[in-house]
Image (cartoon, rainbow, N blue to C red):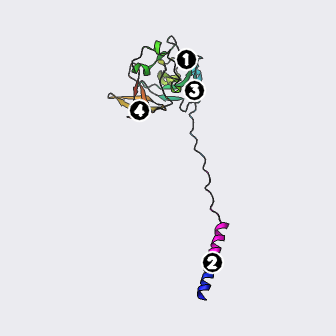
Amino acid sequence: MRSLLLTSVVTLLSVTAAVAQDSNPISAPTPQPTAQVEKKSLPAGLQDVVKKDFGDDITVDTSFPTPFLEADFNGDGSPDIAIVVHAKGVSTKGDYKLIDPYDEYFGYGGVKITSQFETDDVTQKHAVLIIHGNGPEGWRSAQPKEKFVVINMPFDNIKLMNARIKKKSVTGITTHDATGLSAILFWTGKKYHWEPGAADE
């Protein structure tokens, strides 16, 4: 009799627990919003400076994740700027210095030759403008110290980097592309030099 009564109680408790579980289902976790990477806004007047100093065929690539970097690249105390651009046409006769440190590193001919190279590599479709500032106004000065157009350099991301190269402290531009190639572009005191692998050091 006791055995029958105990069995009935256990059965009743099991049914009650099952009903309670069905009436209180576990809630699914609430989806969390995906974090959005904030894009850098262009400095006021940058597009106008590019047009004035480099012409109508060169425009800032506003879709690029990091379209510009501000720093003192040549170490003279005046603010400089590097700008990622689309360049429909560049010339060795422009009011700027057309340079190709990437192909120079590998021993190719002068920029008059390498500026004619055609490529299907999307990471080499961009150019980088560098303006060496003059005085307190920096790169916004009406008369900047120097202006460069860097061509043929492969990258899909750029960042600032303070590095020590050959016992000299430099502020350079690190580049990375989808193949895993990383490098640094820096001012030697006379020219811009491209060095592979330095960005990983």
The amino acid type of the residue labelled 4 equals: Ala
As drawn, 1 above or below 174: below
| Vertical order, 92 against 13 (above or below) | above
| Amino acid at the residue labelled 2 | Thr
Which span of residues is magenta-colored? Answer: 11-31
Nearer mark to the viewer, of 2 and 3: 2
Pointer 1: what residue?
A: 54
The residue sitting at the top extreme is 93
Q: Quadrant of the C terminus?
A: top left
The amino acid type, in three-letter code, at marker 1 is Phe
Prevailing secondary structure class for the magenta stretch in the rendered image: helix
- Type of the residue with mark 3: Asp
How many residues crowd around disc 1 within 10 Å: few (fewer than 14), some, or many (20 or more)?
many
What residue is pinned by disc 2? Answer: 11
Using the image, tell me which numbered label, if any, was put on residue 199.
Answer: 4
Q: Between tags 1 and 4, which lies in front?
A: 4
Element class at badge 1: helix
- The answer to which quarter of the image holds residue 45 is top right
Check contact, mark 4 vs mark 3: CB within 8 A. Answer: no
